[in-house]
């Protein structure tokens, strides 16, 4: 199913940029690839948390499907 979105950005100097998206990223018809998700996560989190913590958090949440007890996730993140 298309979710049409039109956008126009107007810069301070009056320059205008317009675009249209017919299917947003992350929808079943336009899924986010694992590499894209990882890149975005590390780009946003490493400057704030540092690389070791960002890698630990990403690794923890990447494996949530196999977690049987969420207390283990909390314990991992509180270390």
Image (tube, rainbow, N blue to C red):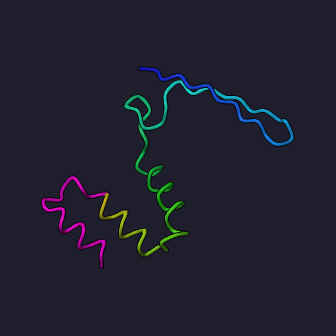
Residue 64 position in % (x across, y down): 24, 56
**Is the stretch drawn in magenta largely helix, strand or loop?**
helix
Residue 35 position in % (x across, y down): 45, 52
Q: Is residue 33 magenta?
A: no
Question: For the C terminus, which image quadrant?
Answer: bottom left
Q: Nearer the viewer, residue 65 or 77?
A: 77
Q: Is residue 54 above or below residue 7?
A: below
Q: Is residue 72 left or right of residue 35?
A: left
Q: Is residue 75 magenta?
A: yes
Residue at the spot 23% in from the left edge and 66% down from the top edge: 73
Residue at the spot 36% in from the left edge and 66% down from the top edge: 57
Q: Is residue 78 above or below residue 65?
A: below
Residue farthest toward the right in the current orientation of the protein? 13
Tell me the quarter of the picture where residue 9 sits. top right
Residue at the spot 83% in from the left edge and 35% down from the top edge: 15
Q: Nearer the viewer, residue 5 or 29?
A: 5
Residue 12 position in % (x across, y down): 82, 43
Q: Which span of residues is magenta-colored?
A: 62-79
Q: Is residue 54 left or right of residue 61?
A: right
Residue farthest toward the top in the current orientation of the protein? 1
Question: For the N terminus, which image quadrant?
Answer: top left
Tell me the quarter of the picture where residue 14 sits. top right
Residue at the spot 46% in from the left edge and 21% down from the top edge: 2
């Amino acid at each position: 199913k298309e979710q049409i979105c039109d956008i126009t950005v107007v810069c301070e100097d009056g320059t205008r940029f317009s675009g249209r998206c017919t299917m947003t990223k992350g929808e079943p018809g336009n899924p986010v690839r694992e590499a894209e998700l990882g890149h975005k996560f590390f780009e946003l989190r490493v400057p704030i948390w540092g690389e070791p913590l960002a890698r630990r958090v990403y690794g923890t949440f990447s494996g949530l499907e196999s977690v049987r007890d969420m207390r283990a996730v909390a314990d991992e993140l509180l270390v």
